[in-house]
Image (tube, coloured by chain):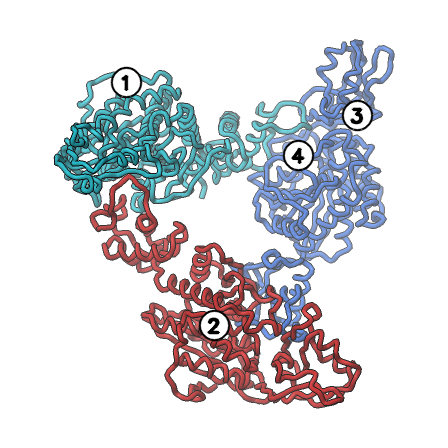
Chain colours: A cyan, B red, C blue
Amino acid sequence: MRTSPAIFAPHDPVALPDGRDGAAMHGLMADLYPICRSITGDGVRETLRGISRHLPLTVTEVPSGLPVFDWTVPLEWNIRDAYIKNRAGERVVDFRKSNLHVVSYSTPIRCRIGLAELKKHLHWDEANPDWIPYRTAYYRQTWGFCLSYNQMLALTDDEYEVCIKSTLRPGHLTYGELFLKGRSDDEVLISCHVCHPSLANDNLSGIAVATALAQHLDRLDLRYSYRFLFIPGTIGSITWIALNQDRLSRIKHGFVLTCVGDGGPPTYKESRRGDAEIDRAWKFVLGATGDGATRPFSPYGYDERQFCSPGINLPVGCFMRTPHGEFPQYHTSADDLDFVDPRALEDSLTRAIDVIDVLENNAYYLNQKSCCEPKLGKYDLYNGIGGGSAGAYQMALLWLLNMSDGHNSLLDIAARAGLDWGTIKRAAEALCKAELLVPARLPVA
Amino acid sequence: MRTSPAIFAPHDPVALPDGRDGAAMHGLMADLYPICRSITGDGVRETLRGISRHLPLTVTEVPSGLPVFDWTVPLEWNIRDAYIKNRAGERVVDFRKSNLHVVSYSTPIRCRIGLAELKKHLHWDEANPDWIPYRTAYYRQTWGFCLSYNQMLALTDDEYEVCIKSTLRPGHLTYGELFLKGRSDDEVLISCHVCHPSLANDNLSGIAVATALAQHLDRLDLRYSYRFLFIPGTIGSITWIALNQDRLSRIKHGFVLTCVGDGGPPTYKESRRGDAEIDRAWKFVLGATGDGATRPFSPYGYDERQFCSPGINLPVGCFMRTPHGEFPQYHTSADDLDFVDPRALEDSLTRAIDVIDVLENNAYYLNQKSCCEPKLGKYDLYNGIGGGSAGAYQMALLWLLNMSDGHNSLLDIAARAGLDWGTIKRAAEALCKAELLVPARLPVA
Amino acid sequence: MRTSPAIFAPHDPVALPDGRDGAAMHGLMADLYPICRSITGDGVRETLRGISRHLPLTVTEVPSGLPVFDWTVPLEWNIRDAYIKNRAGERVVDFRKSNLHVVSYSTPIRCRIGLAELKKHLHWDEANPDWIPYRTAYYRQTWGFCLSYNQMLALTDDEYEVCIKSTLRPGHLTYGELFLKGRSDDEVLISCHVCHPSLANDNLSGIAVATALAQHLDRLDLRYSYRFLFIPGTIGSITWIALNQDRLSRIKHGFVLTCVGDGGPPTYKESRRGDAEIDRAWKFVLGATGDGATRPFSPYGYDERQFCSPGINLPVGCFMRTPHGEFPQYHTSADDLDFVDPRALEDSLTRAIDVIDVLENNAYYLNQKSCCEPKLGKYDLYNGIGGGSAGAYQMALLWLLNMSDGHNSLLDIAARAGLDWGTIKRAAEALCKAELLVPARLPVA
């Protein structure tokens, strides 16, 4: 394969107007929305070029035919135009109006056929009669069109000209990667898929939040290194894993970002391990406000399927709002820019930043004065007239001292004590400064 | 002791008209209902003779006086007739009308006594004034009669002739056994008690379902060997365990069948271990339809008390519908043939067959392509246009591949995934055929 | 330090009229209520002298300045009088009316100041405008007064004479201890704090229940030795722990008694271990009646904070009724003698006695006839005509036989079986007498 940042002109990445602003993320989505993406092809490249206006992406081109585990990198698919014309020469289905009209990876075709034969190649959704469904045929040599149920009803018993100007040739699978070096070689992996055509929540929302998150992290002094993947779903993550097997052991935490822009509450799907630190961090962050939910791992979903396959088994979960398939707009033309709420994007970004703040600061400490409580007043950690009740900060001090025996991390303590992360962090800093806590080398077994 | 199939004429067992038909099971119960059974005696022999019209039972006769653990095989009890006559010579209580009228194991008696003295030997149930209770006096040298509360009220201050024509002499304890040889010497034990007189649900229902289940299994190619016990309660199972100690380690799973014919929902009582495979299999089967319930082990009940005594501790639970003592007809004359619903018998049989199907097919597998998902399309395990949602079979494939790391059996996976057993079995077969799964020698520790 | 029973005249302790009578406990509280206690000083001594009318306390005097872990035994504080006089010479705040009026450990002061300056040293509670709050300033060199909100409002813009006739000098910290020798050197620790001034529930109630409990135990033949501590909160328990480090390993169970006289339901707060035998015993006892609640450990509360600090980590919980801070009268003048209900004191004492009965009698046994059930009739442990249902005692026999494999204590079995403690104890005694159970040397691992 060939790693080619060269395909994009050298540039200084442009920060989104305000990295944490929902409107800016929505704007990036709007830029990328018209592009016809698939798992390979120029649509992916154009998308990565759009992202690289904001981030110094490294782009990798992997040649068709390369074996990757049980799979093979497929032929590259591109499409210029497609339509169904009636005898009057009118385009009754027109790729130029929506790139969802063509089944992704359709083979090229040009022919005239009757309605009955045509219908064998049509897909519609009777339940949502005005929406165009999204369908793919990646590894089948076939072609097809998607259209709304009402469009389908309007087709008369005519002869139709069918035309798909696509190419399916040896080429490349393309993905983008951004590596932010932290103080440690241990990595946090954040992945989103870039293979869906004009669908907004799935997954331009994930692309936008990942982009803003990377910009945010780039301004911080980081403990972990962060690796962002902008990859085609399934074959993209399989390819990336196959090409990076020797580096997988560096990945200590990770999550997939998908469908993070709809109006539903935030949802975290656990990694296959279920109780990895990333799982506990997300549960803590979503639990803190009470409006988020956690779901157990299941082997269906997005690229966590590959990261969590049993031979890989990385601690990688998936963050989303309404899970795929649980909103009716899923995989239809109704998953458009209007469906995505900028406030939801902002909230998703905030949650991800909160989780990363937990990962960055989580640690095990040892109480240096573990026989009875230390006299906090000596360290200026206790003030005020006694006899009243303890505030959250005072409670955080007591919890930290009591549980810092090397078995409990800050996250464990915060979760157990029901304290918010900021408070526990400040209290731990103060106790460290007073030399009442010192970092434990390792969790004590 | 003497093993004596000889007590029954050689014969070809007769299948019930339709082994899974509730009416056929009810018919067998009706045949056996009139017999006066106890823990020893000709009633048990006649009952085993009735069962052996359908199954090639091996019958064992164990002599009175044989020590079995802390117990001794008792004297054999038989009874020809019994009554209480008033001065007018009328039978006011008559064994010929119901064998429940005599306390089981009553010593022979013939005397004349007044009402006050007689009442010391009478048992009735004021709460259910028309029902005759069932009582026993196995290990006490005493006699007694049971009668309805209304019968008792009708007794005048008369002198009564009391007569029990019973014998209590050295003889044998009799039990029946059926062994179905499977491919493995590992055994599944299925036990039911045959010591209750004319009571239908407790436990002619268990006898009927066990008989039909054995007939069903006899037609199958079996992985496990199956041992059916038709034994007197308590002393029968204690005797059987004492005489078979060297074979107990072969028993990998088991359950007692009792009270399986009433209209209540199916209920499984866990073995003492609580999480044995048999416990998980029953919970899975009953949980699948949502109408069954599981109860934790308790040391009161039926012969699971002996199989689950701490020094034996076999993985043997108990399947029933309404647990003993929780239906008012329990141990009264109202537990008659009308109380048993043929549809309940059928449902009980179906559940037992389902559990055995789980045991027969449960196994640990290893995914041979565990790094990322295998490309199911290559193995004809994926069809259709992508973009839609996955069906149960497709989900079963994914769950099996993801969890088959040698730690999770098919049962574990089905329970975790919420999939039905048939689907998971078919999916596992397909994955084995594709050589994506291979059997794991053992659960991987 | 100096151990000085000598400070009290030798005497024969006087039992409370009836050790388990709530009125008697309330009477002891009334005797002690007027005393102005703090963490050191003559108020503590007078309190211990009052308790020692009923118990042969050993009193220890620990000199100011002694280092105890991270702390130092403080100067001794005593107070004779205190007031705030207006220009007319009237005492508008008067220590003689309530010892809560002076912030505990206030430095001596005598001066004239204006209202604005005075208010910087005043504490009140606007939410409860008639109550005087309780405040302390143990380790700060300051002074202050507490008064009701309405008193504060009545202060006019006057010049005030402020006077606190206190002393803060090298002296001693004083605590009382009672050791009841049992058959074993293993100890149960029962601790209550004696440092609060005229507050009834917190903690004269704990002192009264501890006194009655000690009198009750003194009349029994005990398995464990019992150590009662009557100590100042925090610095008292820290001092005691520091001076008794070599004996801590003898403490097998323990609990703090605090706020045990209000009308709320009984509450047990778990030790830091959470599943120690003392935790399970309290949960069993409170769970049996269904009106008690258990709370997880938290590092805020009473002296369990010290006993459960991570380097000490003793199995010491805390028994109370309404937890501190959850009743509005907490740490105010409204926590007076009327606030304490003699029936609540009685109930608290009964619960503590019940828990100690569990500890005293809990043990592991081994079933000597573990293969099948023993024939209970042989041992006179089964009587009656069979066929009916089993009572609680019969169930206790069966549970004990089934679970006595060396892994389950009587407490485990009672909790699992849902049986009351008296029944399980009687059943275990009967089984031991029949030699069906024998004590297991240790829990079998």
Q: Identity of the amino acid at label 3?
A: Ile
Marks 4 and 3, how far apart at CA:
21 Å
Q: Identity of the amino acid at label 1?
A: Pro
**Residue holding disc 3:** C79
Q: SS class of the residue under badge 1?
A: loop
Q: SS class of the residue under badge 4?
A: loop
Marks 2 and 4, how far apart at CA:
63 Å
Camera-side mark, 2 or 4: 2
Q: SS class of the residue under badge 3?
A: strand
Report if the CB atoms under discs 1 and 2 are less than 8 Å apart: no
Is residue C59 among what the camera can see?
Answer: no
Mark 1 nearby-residue class (10 Å; few <14, some 14–19, many ≥20): some
**Residue holding disc 2:** B191
Report if the CB atoms under discs 1 and 3 are less than 8 Å apart: no
**Residue holding disc 4:** C234
Q: SS class of the residue under badge 2?
A: strand
Marks 3 and 2, how far apart at CA:
82 Å
Labels 1 and 2 in the same subunit: no
**Residue holding disc 1:** A13
Is residue C364 among what the camera can see?
Answer: yes
Q: Quadrant of residue C177?
A: top right
Marks 1 and 3, how far apart at CA:
73 Å
Q: Residue at x 52, y 27 (%)?
A: A423
Labels 3 and 2 in the same subunit: no
Camera-side mark, 3 or 2: 2
Report if the CB atoms under discs 1 and 4 are less than 8 Å apart: no
